[in-house]
Image (tube, grey):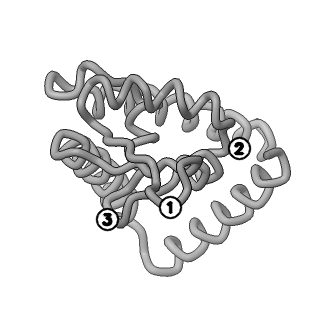
Amino acid sequence: MDTFEVLNNLLVNLFNDILDIEQKALITDEFKDISVTDMHIIEAVGIDEPRTMTAISKLLGVTMGTLTIGMNGLVKKGYVLRVRSTKDRRIVYASLTEKGLSAYRHHKNFHKSMIESVMKNLTEEEASVLTKAFVKLEDFFEQWK
């Protein structure tokens, strides 16, 4: 197999494996009422100051309508709170509830574990090369957004 085929197979398999493994790792008994997509919305809401719905939709690269549908479910399930601005009623802020914070930490721990697992057997030089390769891959993906 030539380099092109090897890289193509690796990227396709990695992408599919990450999605599959993330689904299995994130959606535990505690969080069985949400999807991986919901978990990514929770991550975008974040743990800092409340974020506007507009900021979250831009961060996720989705329309406001798509985000609203996801948020409605997360609010109903008790993961997210939405509050209208008192200064401008058109602006809606989202923040995480305690349940949402728990899901956020669970998601962060999965990613931390994944990165630690990848990094544990790499030299600094290998880690640097891998990082540069992923930055180039990310740059390519940015063109398609």
Residue nearest the observer in this picture, 51 or 60: 51
**Disc on the earlier residue, 2 or 3:** 2
Quadrant containing the N terminus is top right
* Above or below, comparing residue 63 to residue 69 in the picture: below
Residue to which mark 3 is pinned: 120
Q: Is residue 121 left or right of residue 100?
A: right
- Residue 121 position, x and y percent, is 35, 64
Report which residue position mark 1 lands on.
87
Task: Residue at 32% x, 42% y: name it.
Answer: 81
| Circles 2 and 3: CB atoms closer than 8 Å | no
Instruction: Decide which of tag 1 and tag 2 comes sooner along the chain.
Output: 2
Distance between mark 2 and mark 3 Cα atoms: 22 Å
Left or right: residue 63 versus residue 101 is right
For mark 2, what is the residue? 7
Tell me the crowding category of disc 2: few under 14, some 14 to 19, or many 20 or more residues within 10 angstroms, Cα based.
Answer: few
Q: Residue at x 52, y 72 (%)?
A: 126
Q: Tag 2's secondary structure? A: helix
Q: What residue type is labelled 1?
A: Lys
Task: Indicate the amino acid at tag 2.
Answer: Leu
Quadrant assignment, res 139:
bottom right
Q: Is residue 84 above or below residue 129?
A: above
Please identify, in this view, whether the residue under mark 1 or under mark 3 is nearer the observer: 1
Q: Residue furthest right?
A: 143
Q: Is mark 1 on a helix, strand or loop?
A: loop
Q: Distance between the residues labelled 1 and 3?
A: 49 Å
Left/right placement of residue 29 relative to residue 142 reads left
Q: Say which label, 1 or 3, has the lower sequence index.
A: 1
- The residue mark sitting in front, 1 or 2, is 1
Task: State the residue in front, 98 or 52.
Answer: 52
Q: In which quarter of the image is residue 49?
A: bottom left
